[in-house]
Image (cartoon, rainbow, N blue to C red):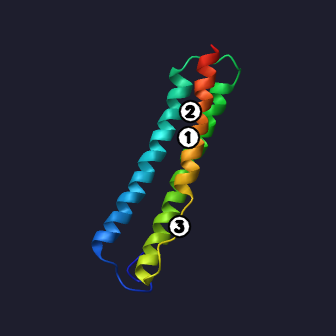
Amino acid sequence: MSRDEPGEEPDYRFTLANERTFLAWLRTSLALLAGAVALVQLVPAFSIPAARTGLAALLAVTATLLAAFAHHRWARVQRAMRLGLPLPTTWLPFAAGWVTALIGVTVLVLVLRR
């Protein structure tokens, strides 16, 4: 986004809030990526072969997609604010929540099977 975009420059407080939300999504993405690394490097193997690697891969893919879609969401919100349109809805919280819950339940089941 540049100042040459159509529309009016939004109140800086809203722009900064949008940026803080974007950075929060990036922190979440980094946390998921750190979880993937920790799962592979620090957690002993589960009773199901390749379960640890599969869960770590799912965490890493989720982290990568979350970071990419966070920027897309930031740009859409910024554009809507410039044009005075309603803020776009997003499926990011829904998807991130369900993937994280799925991974959590899977890890819990694997740990209890030991």
The foreground one among 94 and 8 is 94
Picture layout, residue 36 above or below residue 110: below
Mark pair 3, 1: CA separation: 20 Å
Q: Is residue 66 left or right of residue 55?
A: left
Q: Answer yes or no: is residue 65 visible.
A: no
Name the residue at the bottom extreme. 7
Contact check, label 3 and label 2, Cβ < 8 Å:
no
**Which amino acid is tagged 3?**
Thr
Q: Indicate which disc residue 100 carries.
A: 1
Label 1 environment density (alpha carbons within 10 Å; few <14, some 14–19, many ≥20):
some
**Which amino acid is tagged 2?**
Gly
Figure disc tally:
3
Mark pair 3, 2: CA separation: 26 Å
SS class, disc 1? helix
Task: Estimate the x, y position of residue 39 in percent, counting from the top left.
Answer: 54, 27
Q: Residue at x 50, y 28 (%)?
A: 38
Where, by quadrant of the figure, is residue 90 drawn?
Answer: bottom right
Q: Is residue 24 left or right of residue 51?
A: left
Label 3 environment density (alpha carbons within 10 Å; few <14, some 14–19, many ≥20):
few
Task: Estimate the x, y position of residue 29 in percent, counting from the top left.
Answer: 48, 46
Considering the image in quadrants, where does the N terminus appear? bottom left
Question: Which residue was labeled with disc 2?
Answer: 104
Contact check, label 2 and label 1, Cβ < 8 Å:
yes
Q: Residue at x 37, y 62 (%)?
A: 19
SS class, disc 2? helix
Considering the image in quadrants, where does the C terminus appear? top right
**Which amino acid is tagged 1?**
Thr
SS class, disc 3? loop
